Image (cartoon, rainbow, N blue to C red):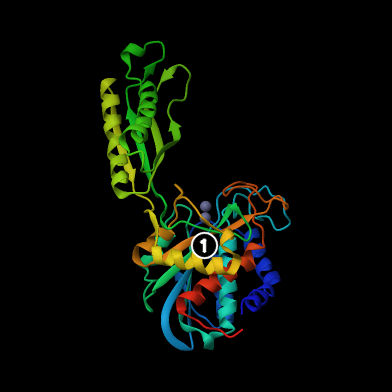
Amino acid sequence: MDADLREQIAGMRDWLVEIRRTIHSHPELAFEEVETARLVSEWLERFGIEVKRGVAKTGVVGLLRGGAPGKTVAIRADMDALPMDEATGVPYASKIKGKMHACGHDAHVTILLGVARFFSSMRDKVKGNITWIFQPGEEGFGGGKLMVEAGVLEDPKVDAIFAAHVFPFLRTGQVGITEGKAMASSDKFILRIIGKGGHGAYPHVTRDPILAAGHVITQIQSVVSRNVNPLDSAVVSFGAVHGGRAYNVIPDEVELTGTVRSLNPAVREELKSRIEQITRGVVASLGLDYHYEFEYGYPVLVNDARMSKLVVSTCAEAIGKENVEILLPSMGAEDFAYYLEKCPGAMFRLGVRNEKKGLIQPHHNTLFNIDEDVLPFGVEMFVRVIDEFLGLKREG
Ligand SMILES: [Zn+2]
Ligand SMILES: [Zn+2]
């Protein structure tokens, strides 16, 4: 059966590449994925899969009811691109200025369509149901949360959910996964240091927010190093500092914004309150005021232990243990976390690195590109995971 399966999927390769390149050259940003959603819906309909469009604005959900009753498994892809210019120079590079598929979501969509094509050709042998979730706005917009709220895990109730992300730190042909807490919660803070502006030559009659901001930035470094248990993980990074316009004017205010990451809800709350305590103390010591806003973002992504093991053992059986890497958690974030709050499942990584082809750039880089061998490979891994979960026995 194994060789057969691989061969059958290899036969889709040109089709997969064409779809991926079509999507790649027409990237769409969060909640604007109109053409991508149309392409997805049209293929699903052609495969005879029930389609729901316009879920959470531009999301698409497909449902295949198998020939016999059984469990329901869902797989999810994200469809959005990033607001950046592509610099790869490949013939199928983005045709739209300022938009690029630099996170590989074009590959995620393509792989899921490959899985749809595969199972639609053998629907009678499917025991149970398969749900396809194509969501908008993963890149910081929480499209996954809206999809869950729209009820995509209900009717039929999803028993397990899987997703994959292409991963440039593993070679093509490799799978990576983290059992348990796999990705961080991601929150944003906005800190306004409020002083009193004036002439740069008369600092004694001002309350300088630039000096205070400098102290705040430095002092906040002690939160991770002094307040968080060294065996826990946390990040506080400033991403923007805005204040002042003229060389000889002390401004009224400085605004600092940053991101807070952690793998543990208690640490998350500790970071939130310590940032404010330090700011309060520092600015008070200099006679200034402050305003603090903390916006909760994606929660921690927790891979279910049983589902992670299912992915590991199923993939290892197909590609060898040596090609399945158990990875350390990442402080990156993913809105697949929202699905995993409601339903057991796992997110795994698909290697797309190929040094011979020069494909070594990280995500979100203007030169990012994937090794397209991941397309049939990804389809195969999903098909195997679904087979295993639904308890499918196909004769080869
Ligand atoms: Zn991304
Ligand atoms: Zn991504």
> In the picture shown, does residue 285 fall above or below 311?
above
Q: Which residue is mark 1?
A: 164
Please state if 105 lies on the left or on the right of 162 as rendered: right
Residue 366, image x, y percentages: 63, 46
Please state if 14 lies on the left or on the right of 179 as rendered: right
Please state if 281 lies on the left or on the right of 16 as rendered: left
Residue 304, image x, y percentages: 39, 63
The quadrant holding residue 316 is bottom right
Residue at image position (36%, 36%) is 224
Front-most of residues 303 and 61: 303
At mark 1, the secondary structure is strand
Residue 263, image x, y percentages: 37, 49
Residue at image position (54%, 85%) is 123
The quadrant holding residue 143 is bottom left
Residue 320, image x, y percentages: 59, 64
> In the picture shown, does residue 328 fall above or below 62?
above
Count neighbours of disc 1 (C-alpha within 10 A) and say few if under 14, some if 14 to 19, many if 20 or more.
Answer: many
Residue at image position (33%, 49%) is 264
Front-most of residues 200 and 362: 362
Front-most of residues 188 and 255: 188
Amino acid identity at mark 1: Ala
